[in-house]
Image (tube, rainbow, N blue to C red):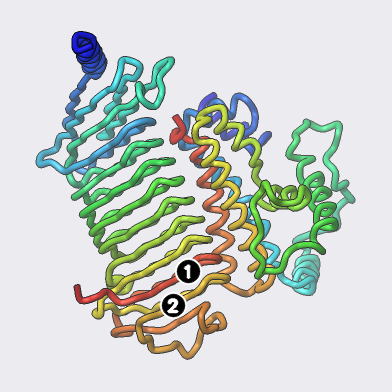
Protein backbone atom coordinates (compact mmCIF):
# COMPACT_ATOMS: atom_id res chain seq x y z
CA UNK A 1 0.00 0.00 0.00
CA UNK A 2 2.76 2.35 1.09
CA UNK A 3 4.90 1.39 -1.92
CA UNK A 4 1.99 1.98 -4.28
CA UNK A 5 1.43 5.44 -2.81
CA UNK A 6 5.10 6.22 -3.31
CA UNK A 7 4.90 5.00 -6.90
CA UNK A 8 1.89 7.18 -7.55
CA UNK A 9 3.63 10.08 -5.90
CA UNK A 10 6.77 9.57 -7.97
CA UNK A 11 4.77 9.25 -11.16
CA UNK A 12 2.85 12.40 -10.33
CA UNK A 13 6.05 14.25 -9.62
CA UNK A 14 7.62 13.03 -12.85
CA UNK A 15 4.49 13.94 -14.75
CA UNK A 16 4.38 17.35 -13.14
CA UNK A 17 8.05 18.00 -13.89
CA UNK A 18 7.54 16.79 -17.45
CA UNK A 19 4.52 19.00 -17.95
CA UNK A 20 6.21 21.97 -16.34
CA UNK A 21 9.34 21.53 -18.40
CA UNK A 22 7.19 21.07 -21.48
CA UNK A 23 5.45 24.38 -20.86
CA UNK A 24 8.75 26.02 -20.00
CA UNK A 25 10.27 24.68 -23.18
CA UNK A 26 7.35 25.96 -25.24
CA UNK A 27 7.31 29.36 -23.57
CA UNK A 28 9.74 31.76 -25.16
CA UNK A 29 10.90 35.28 -24.44
CA UNK A 30 11.53 37.86 -27.07
CA UNK A 31 13.13 41.25 -26.62
CA UNK A 32 13.00 44.01 -29.18
CA UNK A 33 14.47 47.51 -29.11
CA UNK A 34 13.63 50.41 -31.35
CA UNK A 35 15.41 53.75 -31.33
CA UNK A 36 12.73 56.35 -31.86
CA UNK A 37 12.49 60.11 -32.20
CA UNK A 38 10.37 62.23 -29.85
CA UNK A 39 6.61 61.72 -30.03
CA UNK A 40 6.81 58.23 -31.39
CA UNK A 41 3.76 56.03 -31.89
CA UNK A 42 3.33 52.48 -30.68
CA UNK A 43 0.62 50.09 -31.78
CA UNK A 44 0.12 46.68 -30.24
CA UNK A 45 -2.47 44.19 -31.41
CA UNK A 46 -2.53 41.24 -29.05
CA UNK A 47 -5.57 38.96 -29.32
CA UNK A 48 -4.74 36.99 -26.17
CA UNK A 49 -2.68 38.26 -23.29
CA UNK A 50 -1.75 41.44 -21.51
CA UNK A 51 0.03 44.59 -22.55
CA UNK A 52 1.72 46.75 -19.94
CA UNK A 53 3.27 50.09 -20.78
CA UNK A 54 5.65 52.00 -18.55
CA UNK A 55 7.82 55.02 -19.20
CA UNK A 56 11.56 54.99 -19.66
CA UNK A 57 14.20 57.63 -20.13
CA UNK A 58 15.78 58.03 -23.51
CA UNK A 59 14.30 57.68 -26.94
CA UNK A 60 14.00 53.95 -27.08
CA UNK A 61 11.11 51.51 -27.08
CA UNK A 62 11.97 48.27 -25.32
CA UNK A 63 9.64 45.32 -25.81
CA UNK A 64 9.71 42.24 -23.62
CA UNK A 65 7.29 39.63 -24.87
CA UNK A 66 6.54 36.26 -23.31
CA UNK A 67 5.09 33.87 -25.88
CA UNK A 68 3.23 30.94 -24.37
CA UNK A 69 3.86 28.53 -27.25
CA UNK A 70 5.22 28.18 -30.74
CA UNK A 71 1.72 28.70 -32.12
CA UNK A 72 2.10 32.44 -31.87
CA UNK A 73 4.71 34.83 -33.21
CA UNK A 74 5.43 38.49 -32.62
CA UNK A 75 5.58 40.42 -35.87
CA UNK A 76 7.02 43.89 -35.76
CA UNK A 77 7.33 46.80 -38.08
CA UNK A 78 9.18 50.05 -37.52
CA UNK A 79 8.69 52.85 -39.99
CA UNK A 80 8.31 56.59 -39.77
CA UNK A 81 8.81 56.75 -35.99
CA UNK A 82 6.01 54.27 -35.55
CA UNK A 83 6.38 50.84 -33.99
CA UNK A 84 3.76 48.20 -34.78
CA UNK A 85 3.61 44.95 -32.89
CA UNK A 86 1.26 42.16 -33.87
CA UNK A 87 0.77 38.84 -32.13
CA UNK A 88 0.46 36.58 -35.11
CA UNK A 89 -1.65 33.52 -34.34
CA UNK A 90 -0.61 30.42 -36.22
CA UNK A 91 -2.82 27.48 -37.12
CA UNK A 92 -4.35 25.80 -34.09
CA UNK A 93 -3.65 28.63 -31.69
CA UNK A 94 -6.19 29.20 -28.96
CA UNK A 95 -6.53 31.46 -25.94
CA UNK A 96 -3.89 29.50 -24.04
CA UNK A 97 -1.34 28.70 -26.72
CA UNK A 98 -1.81 32.01 -28.51
CA UNK A 99 -1.18 34.10 -25.45
CA UNK A 100 1.54 36.73 -25.46
CA UNK A 101 2.25 39.00 -22.50
CA UNK A 102 4.00 42.23 -23.32
CA UNK A 103 5.91 44.55 -21.02
CA UNK A 104 6.95 47.61 -22.95
CA UNK A 105 8.99 50.62 -21.97
CA UNK A 106 8.42 53.75 -23.99
CA UNK A 107 9.38 57.44 -23.87
CA UNK A 108 6.62 59.24 -21.93
CA UNK A 109 5.53 61.27 -24.96
CA UNK A 110 4.75 58.17 -27.01
CA UNK A 111 1.26 57.80 -28.44
CA UNK A 112 -0.25 54.41 -27.75
CA UNK A 113 -2.82 52.26 -29.52
CA UNK A 114 -3.37 48.96 -27.75
CA UNK A 115 -5.79 46.23 -28.76
CA UNK A 116 -6.55 43.01 -26.96
CA UNK A 117 -9.45 40.62 -26.82
CA UNK A 118 -9.04 39.31 -23.32
CA UNK A 119 -5.83 40.41 -21.65
CA UNK A 120 -5.28 43.35 -19.37
CA UNK A 121 -4.29 46.61 -21.04
CA UNK A 122 -2.31 48.78 -18.67
CA UNK A 123 -0.43 52.05 -19.10
CA UNK A 124 1.01 54.48 -16.61
CA UNK A 125 2.94 57.75 -16.41
CA UNK A 126 2.46 58.60 -20.08
CA UNK A 127 1.54 61.93 -21.62
CA UNK A 128 1.12 60.87 -25.21
CA UNK A 129 -2.34 60.11 -26.56
CA UNK A 130 -3.74 56.75 -25.58
CA UNK A 131 -6.24 54.53 -27.39
CA UNK A 132 -7.12 51.25 -25.72
CA UNK A 133 -9.58 48.81 -27.17
CA UNK A 134 -10.62 45.35 -26.15
CA UNK A 135 -13.62 43.08 -25.95
CA UNK A 136 -13.25 41.55 -22.51
CA UNK A 137 -9.96 43.24 -21.81
CA UNK A 138 -9.52 44.88 -18.44
CA UNK A 139 -8.23 48.41 -18.90
CA UNK A 140 -6.15 50.23 -16.32
CA UNK A 141 -4.70 53.68 -16.86
CA UNK A 142 -2.79 55.52 -14.17
CA UNK A 143 -0.95 58.81 -13.86
CA UNK A 144 -1.67 60.14 -17.32
CA UNK A 145 -1.43 63.86 -18.02
CA UNK A 146 -2.33 66.19 -20.86
CA UNK A 147 -3.38 63.41 -23.20
CA UNK A 148 -6.30 62.35 -25.30
CA UNK A 149 -7.51 59.12 -23.77
CA UNK A 150 -9.92 56.94 -25.70
CA UNK A 151 -11.04 53.61 -24.30
CA UNK A 152 -13.44 51.13 -25.83
CA UNK A 153 -14.47 47.87 -24.24
CA UNK A 154 -17.22 45.35 -24.67
CA UNK A 155 -17.51 44.06 -21.12
CA UNK A 156 -14.07 44.62 -19.70
CA UNK A 157 -13.89 46.87 -16.66
CA UNK A 158 -12.17 50.23 -17.08
CA UNK A 159 -10.26 51.98 -14.32
CA UNK A 160 -8.68 55.38 -14.83
CA UNK A 161 -6.69 56.77 -11.93
CA UNK A 162 -5.11 60.20 -11.69
CA UNK A 163 -5.67 61.31 -15.27
CA UNK A 164 -5.01 65.05 -15.30
CA UNK A 165 -5.91 67.62 -17.95
CA UNK A 166 -7.16 64.88 -20.21
CA UNK A 167 -9.54 64.70 -23.10
CA UNK A 168 -11.13 61.48 -21.96
CA UNK A 169 -13.64 59.37 -23.84
CA UNK A 170 -14.69 55.99 -22.55
CA UNK A 171 -17.19 53.78 -24.37
CA UNK A 172 -18.14 50.53 -22.72
CA UNK A 173 -21.04 48.27 -23.55
CA UNK A 174 -21.31 46.45 -20.23
CA UNK A 175 -18.05 46.92 -18.37
CA UNK A 176 -18.00 49.00 -15.21
CA UNK A 177 -16.11 52.26 -15.50
CA UNK A 178 -14.29 53.79 -12.56
CA UNK A 179 -12.74 57.24 -12.77
CA UNK A 180 -10.63 58.16 -9.78
CA UNK A 181 -9.07 61.59 -9.82
CA UNK A 182 -9.84 62.19 -13.49
CA UNK A 183 -10.22 65.73 -14.74
CA UNK A 184 -9.76 67.75 -17.87
CA UNK A 185 -11.49 69.90 -20.44
CA UNK A 186 -13.60 66.98 -21.65
CA UNK A 187 -14.44 63.80 -19.79
CA UNK A 188 -17.12 61.62 -21.33
CA UNK A 189 -18.26 58.13 -20.47
CA UNK A 190 -20.95 56.27 -22.38
CA UNK A 191 -22.08 52.87 -21.20
CA UNK A 192 -24.99 50.71 -22.20
CA UNK A 193 -25.39 48.54 -19.11
CA UNK A 194 -22.24 49.07 -17.09
CA UNK A 195 -22.04 51.19 -13.97
CA UNK A 196 -20.06 54.41 -13.78
CA UNK A 197 -18.25 55.59 -10.67
CA UNK A 198 -16.58 58.96 -10.50
CA UNK A 199 -14.42 59.93 -7.54
CA UNK A 200 -12.91 63.38 -7.74
CA UNK A 201 -13.61 67.08 -7.85
CA UNK A 202 -14.55 67.55 -11.52
CA UNK A 203 -11.66 70.00 -11.99
CA UNK A 204 -12.21 73.54 -13.27
CA UNK A 205 -14.13 74.63 -16.35
CA UNK A 206 -14.40 71.12 -17.72
CA UNK A 207 -17.28 69.32 -19.38
CA UNK A 208 -18.12 66.02 -17.77
CA UNK A 209 -20.76 63.79 -19.23
CA UNK A 210 -21.48 60.39 -17.71
CA UNK A 211 -24.20 58.40 -19.46
CA UNK A 212 -25.48 54.90 -18.98
CA UNK A 213 -28.61 53.29 -20.31
CA UNK A 214 -29.21 50.84 -17.49
CA UNK A 215 -26.12 51.07 -15.29
CA UNK A 216 -25.98 53.07 -12.07
CA UNK A 217 -23.98 56.28 -11.91
CA UNK A 218 -22.34 57.43 -8.72
CA UNK A 219 -20.27 60.56 -8.27
CA UNK A 220 -18.45 61.10 -5.01
CA UNK A 221 -16.98 64.55 -4.65
CA UNK A 222 -15.07 66.48 -1.97
CA UNK A 223 -16.33 69.64 -0.27
CA UNK A 224 -14.11 71.78 -2.43
CA UNK A 225 -15.88 70.81 -5.65
CA UNK A 226 -17.23 73.56 -7.89
CA UNK A 227 -19.63 72.21 -10.44
CA UNK A 228 -22.87 72.86 -12.21
CA UNK A 229 -24.49 69.45 -11.96
CA UNK A 230 -27.56 68.21 -13.78
CA UNK A 231 -28.78 64.67 -13.30
CA UNK A 232 -31.70 62.94 -14.89
CA UNK A 233 -32.90 59.37 -15.03
CA UNK A 234 -35.94 58.43 -17.07
CA UNK A 235 -36.96 55.46 -14.95
CA UNK A 236 -34.33 55.25 -12.25
CA UNK A 237 -33.98 57.13 -9.01
CA UNK A 238 -31.85 60.22 -8.61
CA UNK A 239 -30.35 61.09 -5.24
CA UNK A 240 -28.45 64.16 -4.22
CA UNK A 241 -26.84 64.27 -0.79
CA UNK A 242 -25.21 67.63 -1.39
CA UNK A 243 -27.06 70.92 -1.05
CA UNK A 244 -27.08 72.53 -4.47
CA UNK A 245 -28.05 76.02 -5.44
CA UNK A 246 -30.96 75.30 -7.77
CA UNK A 247 -30.85 76.62 -11.31
CA UNK A 248 -33.48 79.16 -12.25
CA UNK A 249 -33.69 78.13 -15.87
CA UNK A 250 -33.46 74.52 -16.88
CA UNK A 251 -33.88 72.85 -20.23
CA UNK A 252 -35.95 70.02 -18.76
CA UNK A 253 -38.51 69.66 -16.02
CA UNK A 254 -36.78 68.94 -12.74
CA UNK A 255 -38.94 66.33 -11.08
CA UNK A 256 -38.20 65.40 -7.50
CA UNK A 257 -36.57 61.97 -7.29
CA UNK A 258 -35.83 61.65 -10.98
CA UNK A 259 -33.79 64.76 -11.72
CA UNK A 260 -31.91 67.64 -10.17
CA UNK A 261 -29.96 70.58 -11.47
CA UNK A 262 -27.93 72.93 -9.37
CA UNK A 263 -24.59 74.47 -8.60
CA UNK A 264 -22.15 73.60 -5.84
CA UNK A 265 -19.08 75.60 -4.86
CA UNK A 266 -17.93 78.65 -6.80
CA UNK A 267 -19.94 79.13 -9.94
CA UNK A 268 -17.18 81.18 -11.59
CA UNK A 269 -14.84 78.22 -11.90
CA UNK A 270 -17.36 75.43 -11.97
CA UNK A 271 -17.30 72.59 -14.41
CA UNK A 272 -20.39 71.39 -16.21
CA UNK A 273 -21.41 67.94 -15.10
CA UNK A 274 -24.13 65.98 -16.87
CA UNK A 275 -25.30 62.67 -15.46
CA UNK A 276 -27.86 60.76 -17.52
CA UNK A 277 -29.48 57.36 -17.36
CA UNK A 278 -32.62 55.64 -18.57
CA UNK A 279 -32.99 52.81 -16.08
CA UNK A 280 -30.06 53.25 -13.72
CA UNK A 281 -29.87 55.11 -10.44
CA UNK A 282 -27.86 58.30 -10.15
CA UNK A 283 -26.30 59.29 -6.89
CA UNK A 284 -24.26 62.40 -6.13
CA UNK A 285 -22.70 62.35 -2.72
CA UNK A 286 -20.01 63.94 -0.68
CA UNK A 287 -16.76 62.16 0.05
CA UNK A 288 -16.53 61.26 3.70
CA UNK A 289 -13.78 62.79 5.84
CA UNK A 290 -12.08 59.41 6.12
CA UNK B 1 -8.70 44.14 -51.92
CA UNK B 2 -6.92 47.33 -50.91
CA UNK B 3 -8.32 50.12 -48.76
CA UNK B 4 -8.91 52.26 -51.84
CA UNK B 5 -10.67 49.42 -53.62
CA UNK B 6 -12.84 48.81 -50.61
CA UNK B 7 -13.83 52.43 -50.31
CA UNK B 8 -14.67 52.54 -54.01
CA UNK B 9 -16.67 49.33 -53.69
CA UNK B 10 -18.74 50.89 -50.91
CA UNK B 11 -20.44 52.97 -53.59
CA UNK B 12 -21.92 49.76 -54.93
CA UNK B 13 -22.42 48.00 -51.62
CA UNK B 14 -22.28 50.41 -48.74
CA UNK B 15 -22.84 47.88 -45.97
CA UNK B 16 -19.53 46.10 -46.50
CA UNK B 17 -21.40 42.85 -47.00
CA UNK B 18 -19.64 41.17 -49.93
CA UNK B 19 -17.17 38.39 -49.31
CA UNK B 20 -14.24 40.46 -50.53
CA UNK B 21 -15.29 43.41 -48.42
CA UNK B 22 -15.75 41.28 -45.34
CA UNK B 23 -12.34 39.69 -45.82
CA UNK B 24 -10.72 43.11 -46.05
CA UNK B 25 -12.67 44.48 -43.09
CA UNK B 26 -11.52 41.61 -40.92
CA UNK B 27 -7.90 42.61 -41.43
CA UNK B 28 -8.20 46.37 -41.63
CA UNK B 29 -9.37 48.17 -38.49
CA UNK B 30 -9.27 51.50 -40.30
CA UNK B 31 -11.78 50.45 -42.94
CA UNK B 32 -13.83 48.52 -40.36
CA UNK B 33 -14.12 51.69 -38.34
CA UNK B 34 -15.01 53.65 -41.45
CA UNK B 35 -17.82 51.27 -42.37
CA UNK B 36 -19.14 51.24 -38.82
CA UNK B 37 -19.11 55.04 -38.75
CA UNK B 38 -20.87 55.23 -42.10
CA UNK B 39 -23.57 52.91 -40.87
CA UNK B 40 -24.17 54.83 -37.69
CA UNK B 41 -24.20 58.16 -39.52
CA UNK B 42 -26.68 56.82 -42.05
CA UNK B 43 -28.93 55.52 -39.30
CA UNK B 44 -28.70 58.48 -36.97
CA UNK B 45 -29.02 61.06 -39.73
CA UNK B 46 -32.41 59.73 -40.71
CA UNK B 47 -33.67 59.88 -37.16
CA UNK B 48 -32.36 63.34 -36.44
CA UNK B 49 -33.35 64.80 -39.79
CA UNK B 50 -36.95 63.90 -39.05
CA UNK B 51 -36.79 65.72 -35.73
CA UNK B 52 -35.30 68.84 -37.29
CA UNK B 53 -37.31 68.80 -40.50
CA UNK B 54 -38.65 72.29 -41.18
CA UNK B 55 -42.32 72.68 -41.97
CA UNK B 56 -43.60 72.41 -45.57
CA UNK B 57 -44.10 76.16 -45.79
CA UNK B 58 -40.36 76.66 -45.36
CA UNK B 59 -39.57 74.31 -48.25
CA UNK B 60 -42.28 75.91 -50.38
CA UNK B 61 -40.94 79.41 -49.83
CA UNK B 62 -37.39 78.26 -50.57
CA UNK B 63 -38.54 76.55 -53.74
CA UNK B 64 -40.53 79.61 -54.82
CA UNK B 65 -37.54 81.86 -54.29
CA UNK B 66 -35.19 79.56 -56.17
CA UNK B 67 -37.59 79.30 -59.11
CA UNK B 68 -38.04 83.06 -59.15
CA UNK B 69 -34.28 83.47 -59.27
CA UNK B 70 -34.08 80.90 -62.06
CA UNK B 71 -31.73 78.74 -60.05
CA UNK B 72 -33.93 75.66 -60.38
CA UNK B 73 -36.02 74.72 -63.37
CA UNK B 74 -38.85 72.27 -63.85
CA UNK B 75 -37.54 68.75 -64.30
CA UNK B 76 -38.82 65.65 -66.03
CA UNK B 77 -40.76 63.21 -63.91
CA UNK B 78 -38.62 60.39 -62.67
CA UNK B 79 -39.67 57.10 -61.18
CA UNK B 80 -38.94 56.59 -57.53
CA UNK B 81 -37.87 53.07 -58.34
CA UNK B 82 -34.41 52.52 -59.76
CA UNK B 83 -34.09 51.55 -63.36
CA UNK B 84 -33.94 47.88 -64.16
CA UNK B 85 -31.99 48.61 -67.30
CA UNK B 86 -29.27 50.71 -65.72
CA UNK B 87 -26.24 49.39 -63.92
CA UNK B 88 -27.62 47.30 -61.08
CA UNK B 89 -26.96 48.21 -57.51
CA UNK B 90 -28.89 46.75 -54.62
CA UNK B 91 -28.58 50.03 -52.80
CA UNK B 92 -30.80 51.55 -55.46
CA UNK B 93 -33.58 49.20 -54.45
CA UNK B 94 -32.75 49.21 -50.77
CA UNK B 95 -34.40 52.53 -50.00
CA UNK B 96 -37.86 51.85 -51.46
CA UNK B 97 -37.74 48.29 -50.16
CA UNK B 98 -36.80 49.46 -46.69
CA UNK B 99 -39.51 52.10 -46.82
CA UNK B 100 -42.14 49.52 -47.71
CA UNK B 101 -40.96 47.21 -44.94
CA UNK B 102 -40.83 50.01 -42.39
CA UNK B 103 -44.26 51.33 -43.32
CA UNK B 104 -45.74 47.84 -43.13
CA UNK B 105 -44.12 47.10 -39.79
CA UNK B 106 -45.03 50.54 -38.54
CA UNK B 107 -48.70 49.98 -39.39
CA UNK B 108 -48.66 46.59 -37.71
CA UNK B 109 -46.70 47.48 -34.65
CA UNK B 110 -47.00 51.16 -33.91
CA UNK B 111 -50.43 51.04 -32.24
CA UNK B 112 -49.09 48.42 -29.84
CA UNK B 113 -45.82 50.15 -29.07
CA UNK B 114 -45.30 50.48 -25.31
CA UNK B 115 -45.34 53.94 -23.75
CA UNK B 116 -42.07 55.55 -22.75
CA UNK B 117 -42.40 54.49 -19.12
CA UNK B 118 -42.60 50.79 -19.83
CA UNK B 119 -39.50 48.66 -19.62
CA UNK B 120 -39.53 46.11 -22.37
CA UNK B 121 -37.82 42.76 -22.54
CA UNK B 122 -34.96 41.57 -24.65
CA UNK B 123 -34.83 40.37 -28.21
CA UNK B 124 -35.66 36.80 -27.39
CA UNK B 125 -38.76 37.61 -25.38
CA UNK B 126 -40.22 40.12 -27.81
CA UNK B 127 -42.92 39.43 -30.29
CA UNK B 128 -41.57 38.75 -33.74
CA UNK B 129 -43.01 41.97 -35.12
CA UNK B 130 -41.38 44.03 -32.38
CA UNK B 131 -38.04 42.34 -32.96
CA UNK B 132 -38.34 43.05 -36.66
CA UNK B 133 -39.11 46.67 -35.97
CA UNK B 134 -36.18 46.88 -33.65
CA UNK B 135 -33.86 45.45 -36.27
CA UNK B 136 -35.21 47.90 -38.79
CA UNK B 137 -34.95 50.96 -36.63
CA UNK B 138 -31.48 49.98 -35.59
CA UNK B 139 -30.70 49.91 -39.28
CA UNK B 140 -27.86 47.49 -38.89
CA UNK B 141 -28.01 43.81 -39.57
CA UNK B 142 -27.75 42.10 -36.22
CA UNK B 143 -27.73 38.64 -37.71
CA UNK B 144 -24.64 39.47 -39.74
CA UNK B 145 -22.91 40.65 -36.61
CA UNK B 146 -23.73 37.50 -34.67
CA UNK B 147 -22.76 35.31 -37.62
CA UNK B 148 -19.41 37.06 -37.81
CA UNK B 149 -18.81 36.58 -34.10
CA UNK B 150 -19.91 32.94 -34.28
CA UNK B 151 -17.38 32.38 -37.01
CA UNK B 152 -14.49 34.33 -35.55
CA UNK B 153 -14.93 33.86 -31.82
CA UNK B 154 -17.70 31.47 -30.77
CA UNK B 155 -16.76 31.86 -27.12
CA UNK B 156 -17.76 35.52 -27.27
CA UNK B 157 -21.11 34.96 -28.95
CA UNK B 158 -23.11 34.99 -25.72
CA UNK B 159 -21.51 38.27 -24.70
CA UNK B 160 -22.20 39.85 -28.05
CA UNK B 161 -25.79 38.62 -28.03
CA UNK B 162 -26.37 40.08 -24.58
CA UNK B 163 -24.72 43.37 -25.47
CA UNK B 164 -26.63 43.55 -28.73
CA UNK B 165 -29.92 43.09 -26.87
CA UNK B 166 -28.95 45.79 -24.39
CA UNK B 167 -27.87 48.29 -27.01
CA UNK B 168 -31.05 47.70 -29.01
CA UNK B 169 -32.99 48.43 -25.82
CA UNK B 170 -30.96 51.60 -25.51
CA UNK B 171 -31.79 52.67 -29.06
CA UNK B 172 -35.45 51.88 -28.61
CA UNK B 173 -35.68 53.81 -25.34
CA UNK B 174 -33.86 56.75 -26.86
CA UNK B 175 -36.24 56.75 -29.82
CA UNK B 176 -39.29 56.68 -27.59
CA UNK B 177 -37.83 59.51 -25.58
CA UNK B 178 -37.15 61.54 -28.72
CA UNK B 179 -40.61 60.82 -30.08
CA UNK B 180 -42.15 62.01 -26.84
CA UNK B 181 -39.96 65.12 -26.61
CA UNK B 182 -38.71 66.14 -30.06
CA UNK B 183 -37.18 69.35 -28.71
CA UNK B 184 -35.31 67.69 -25.88
CA UNK B 185 -31.57 68.02 -26.46
CA UNK B 186 -30.92 65.15 -24.08
CA UNK B 187 -33.11 62.88 -26.14
CA UNK B 188 -31.17 63.72 -29.30
CA UNK B 189 -27.90 63.15 -27.53
CA UNK B 190 -29.11 59.87 -26.05
CA UNK B 191 -30.05 58.55 -29.48
CA UNK B 192 -26.65 59.49 -30.85
CA UNK B 193 -24.98 57.83 -27.86
CA UNK B 194 -27.03 54.69 -28.33
CA UNK B 195 -26.12 54.45 -32.01
CA UNK B 196 -22.52 55.12 -31.13
CA UNK B 197 -22.59 52.17 -28.77
CA UNK B 198 -24.05 49.97 -31.46
CA UNK B 199 -21.47 51.15 -33.95
CA UNK B 200 -18.78 50.26 -31.46
CA UNK B 201 -20.21 46.78 -31.10
CA UNK B 202 -20.07 46.31 -34.86
CA UNK B 203 -16.63 47.83 -35.06
CA UNK B 204 -15.34 45.41 -32.47
CA UNK B 205 -16.85 42.47 -34.25
CA UNK B 206 -15.32 43.51 -37.57
CA UNK B 207 -12.15 44.89 -36.11
CA UNK B 208 -9.10 43.04 -34.86
CA UNK B 209 -10.41 42.88 -31.30
CA UNK B 210 -11.76 39.51 -32.25
CA UNK B 211 -8.97 36.98 -32.40
Residue indicated by mark 2 = A239
- Mark identifier at residue A103: none
User: Which chain does the residue under circle 2 lie in?
Assistant: A
Q: Gap between marks 2 and 1, in whole Å?
A: 8 Å
Residue A233 x %, y %: 52, 71
Instruction: Say which quarter of the image contains residue B11.
Output: top right
Judging depth in this view, the residue of A287 and A28 nearest the camera is: A287
Q: The C terminus of chain A appears in which quarter of the rendering?
A: bottom left
Residue indicated by mark 1 = A281
Q: Which residue is pictured at 27% across the width and 50% down the height? A: A141
Q: Are marks 2 and 1 in contact (CB under 8 Å)?
A: yes
Count of labels shown? 2
Instruction: Determine whether A114 is above or below A175 in the image.
Output: above
Helix, strand or loop under label 2:
strand
The outermost residue toward the front is: A1
Q: Is residue A18 visible?
A: no
Q: The N terminus of chain A appears in which quarter of the rendering?
A: top left
Q: Earlier in the sequence, mark 2 or mark 1?
A: 2
Residue B190 x %, y %: 55, 63
Q: Which residue is pictured at 55% across the width and 66% down the height? A: A278
Instruction: Determine whether B183 is above or below B147 in the image.
Output: below
Q: Is residue B114 left or right of residue A61?
A: right
Amino acid sequence: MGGRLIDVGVCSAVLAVTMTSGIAAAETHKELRFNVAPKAALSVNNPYGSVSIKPTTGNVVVVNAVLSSDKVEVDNNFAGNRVDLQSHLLAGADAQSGRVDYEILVPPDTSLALHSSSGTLRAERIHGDVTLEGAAAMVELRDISGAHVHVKTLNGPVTLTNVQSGYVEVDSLSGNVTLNGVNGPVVQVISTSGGINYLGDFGDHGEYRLTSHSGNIEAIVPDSTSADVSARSVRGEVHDDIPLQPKQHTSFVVKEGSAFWGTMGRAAVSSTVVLRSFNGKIHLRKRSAK
Amino acid sequence: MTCVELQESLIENDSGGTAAQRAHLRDCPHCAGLVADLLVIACAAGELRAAHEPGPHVWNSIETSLRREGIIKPFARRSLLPSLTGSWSWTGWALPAAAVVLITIGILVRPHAPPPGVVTGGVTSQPASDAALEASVAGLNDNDLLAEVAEQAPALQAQYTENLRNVNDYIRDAKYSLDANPNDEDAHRALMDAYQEKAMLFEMALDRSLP
